[in-house]
Amino acid sequence: MKQIAERLTIPKTREDLLEELREADADVTACFQCGRCSAGCPVAEFFDLKPMEVVRLCCYGEENLLTESRTVWLCASCETCTTRCPNGIDIARVMDVLRSRALRKGQVRIEPKVVAFHKSFLGSIRNHGRVFEMGMLTGYMLRTGDLFSRMGLGLEMFKRGKIKFLPERIKGTGEIRSMFRRK
């Protein structure tokens, strides 16, 4: 009888994951696997797990499997899946939570360039309140060690006024930084 009770015990990591998802207003337990999220995803062909499979694996507490998956890192966060969900599950936010947890725990094992871009993008928002393309791209190039392969493209974009040399100032950058400190 004790063996059965041990198998029925919910692992702590699963409860932690489900609680963090609930706090982020992404209650994956409401999913009934209709598949609308997966059918509407514009980048699903590049995934190894469908969005609905990610949601189900969250329910099972399979965090290691999820963070080893390409899906979490390749999600474009376009929110098509979220819009299509009849139960209002914010699947794009689920992906964000999974990426954040993986980064906090040092469990990033695949897609190093995507992770480098993710860190550079969020760093740009944290520092400037919005994306500062030149700074973000510089951070990305330093993280990947690929310093010169896109130099010509960057110079051309700069000449055409597509990217600025200095960041634009916005109001409330302190508030944005405080949001990053909360987690």
Image (cartoon, rainbow, N blue to C red):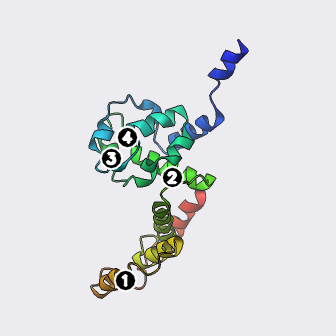
**Mark in front: 1 vs 3:** 3
Total tally of numbered discs in the picture: 4
Circle 2: residue type: Arg
Q: Residue at x 38, y 41 (%)?
A: 51
Left or right: 104 in relation to 145 = right
State which quadrant residue 19 falls in: top right
Nearer to the camera, 161 or 143: 143
Q: CA distance from mark 2 to mark 4?
A: 16 Å
Whether tag 4 and tag 3 are in contact, CB under 8 A, the answer is: yes
Disc 2 residue crowd, few under 14, some 14–19, many 20+, Cα 10 Å: many
Residue identifier under label 3:
44
Nearer to the camera, 77 or 144: 144
Question: Whole-percent x and y of residue 131?
Answer: 41, 71
**Mark in front: 4 vs 1:** 4
Mark sitting earlier along the chain (4/3): 3
Q: Residue at x 30, y 84 (%)?
A: 156
Q: Residue at x 38, y 47 (%)?
A: 47
Residue identifier under label 1:
164
Question: Whole-percent x and y of residue 111?
Answer: 47, 57
Question: Whole-percent x and y of residue 48?
Answer: 40, 44
Give residue 37's mark. Answer: none
Residue identifier under label 4:
50
Whether tag 3 and tag 2 are in contact, CB under 8 A, the answer is: no
Residue identifier under label 2:
99
